[in-house]
Every structure is written in structure tokens, then in C-alpha cells.
Amino acid sequence: MERVSAKDLFEKDEPIVMVAAYDAATAEIIDDIADVILVGDSVGNVRLGYDDTLPVTLEESLSHTAAVARGSERAMVVGDMPFASFGVSKDRSAENAARYLKEAGAGAVKLETPVDGGVSVDTVRHLSQLGVPVMGHVGLTPQQVRREGYAVQGRDEGEADAILERARELEEAGVFSVVLEAVPESLGARVTEALDVPTVGIGAGRAVDGQVLVIDDLVGMSDGTPSFVKEYADVRGVMRDAVEEYADDVREGGFPADEHVFGGGEG
Ligand code: KIV
């Protein structure tokens, strides 16, 4: 089966559906629904128990990306390069980015590409020229949390103009798509209007080319979600209820029952 490609996303005449997910089992469940599975560095705080995304290592990210690639066959898999695995030097950025394609089976990488930090447009151009499909990421970029916090970005005109300009530069450098995170809806619309490549929003309003949410947030597995998230289920509640019921059964002797035990001679 052919995977969704950057060209498919460019040509799509309906909104792009992107989900951040981290393991093979989840990838297998959503592979025929999502266009893109982003193996976000949000794995750090969502699944690995870190306070934020900064401690995520390249090896952890590659391992989760490879798991998602193994669990899927149709969706585009995008590996989200963790803090300081890119941007330190052009060559190191290229070597690390190539590992997502060569070792982890990703179709592309995402780099956080804030207005004033993280990575130079030149490095983005270098990766693109090498043949690594790159997704940019502007607005709120969580890898800058220790400098900027988690505030909505682009509320004032100067900041909004700078984000728009950055997105334009990224497109010129060869990105195939840009994530817009936590920006006013009007800025989401301006950036989407200005770019040929598709934009994918998270907390960026409706006038973008697609949406991305973290799987744990959208299925209600997280303990609290930002206001821009819609929870479509209560998996946390379902899980807790199931484990409580199991615990009661174990404690009261209701599990295992006859049908769960191996009989004497029959195996
Ligand atoms: O790490 C992540 O999951 C992300 C998305 C929320 C865009 O970067």
C-alpha cells in the first residue's frame, strides 16, 4: 500500500487530519483514518513522564517513530525531532534527520522553527535539498518553553507579522507543510492565505488546511487538556472503571472464573 505523500497533502481538497501518536498499537488503530501520524516530541510529557518535551532524546524519538511506522502502512509518518537534535550544526541536523528516514521508516521530519531560535532557515533548506521532507512549526513552539512559556503567540501585530514572515521563509526553504500552534484564528488565516504549502493547526482556528491533536487529548486519556482541544471520548474514565472492576474481581474472587482457567488434562 502506498503511503500518503507530501504531494498527496498538497493536492488534497479536504482538510488534512493529523494525529500525534506514539506507538504501534495506536498507529494500527488510526492508520486508515488519519492522513498523517506525527510522532510528536510531546511523547515526553504525554507518555514518558517528563515535565516538558526538552528531555526527550533522539533515540527515544526514533524508537517511537519506528514503532508507529511498524504499526501503520498508509498514513504518512512524521518524526518530530527533539530539542537540540537539530540546529546545533547543519551537518549534525542532516545526519540526525536522515536517521528518521533510514532507520525509523518515517516519511518526513518536523522541526520546531520559531521566529528567533531553534534552527536557521539555512538548515531547513539544507535538509530539504538533501531529500528530507521537512514540516515546519511556528507559533507556540514547546521546545522554547523555558524561554517563552506556553503563551499564545502572535497576539500583537509585530509578533504576528514576524510569524507570517517566518512561515514564508520556511516555504521558500522547501518545507512541505507548516504546523501553526496556539495563534489567533486571524493569524492562522493570514499564514494559510500567504502560503502555497498546507498549514496544519493546533489551537490555530478554522481557516487552516488541516488540524492536529494529540491522541491522548482527543480520546480523553489526558489528565486535563488545553481549551482548544475537543475530547471525543473518556478513555481515561473507561480505563479506570475497567481496572477498578478487575481489581474488585481479583480481591473478591470473581476473576479468574471457570472460563479463564486451564482444565487438568486438556491444557
Ligand atoms: O509534539 C507534538 O505533538 C506536536 C504537535 C502538538 C504539533 O508538536
Image (cartoon, helix red, strand yellow):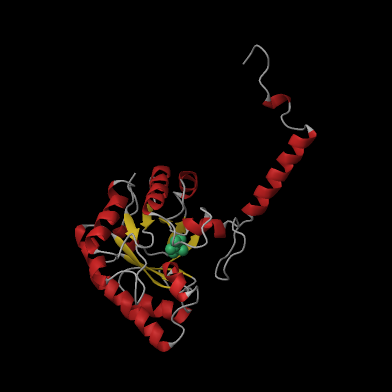
Percent coordinates x, y for residue 32 in the rendering: 44, 49
- The answer to whether residue 27 is visible is yes
Vertical relation: 155 (above or below) 78 = below
Residue 158, above or below 229: below
User: In the picture, residue 251 is in which quadrant?
Assistant: top right
**In which quarter of the view is residue 18 placed?**
bottom left
- Image quadrant occupied by the N terminus: top left
Across and down, in percent, residue 159 comes to 40, 84
Asked whether residue 181 appears in the rendered view, the answer is no
Q: Quadrant of the C terminus?
A: top right
- Residue 91: where, in percent of width, then height? 22, 60
- Which residue occupies 49% across, 47% down? 26
Residue plotted at (56% across, 60% down): 217
Residue 193 percent across, percent down from the top left = 36, 78
Residue located 41% across and 64% down the image: 14
With respect to residue 267, does 31 lie above or below?
A: below
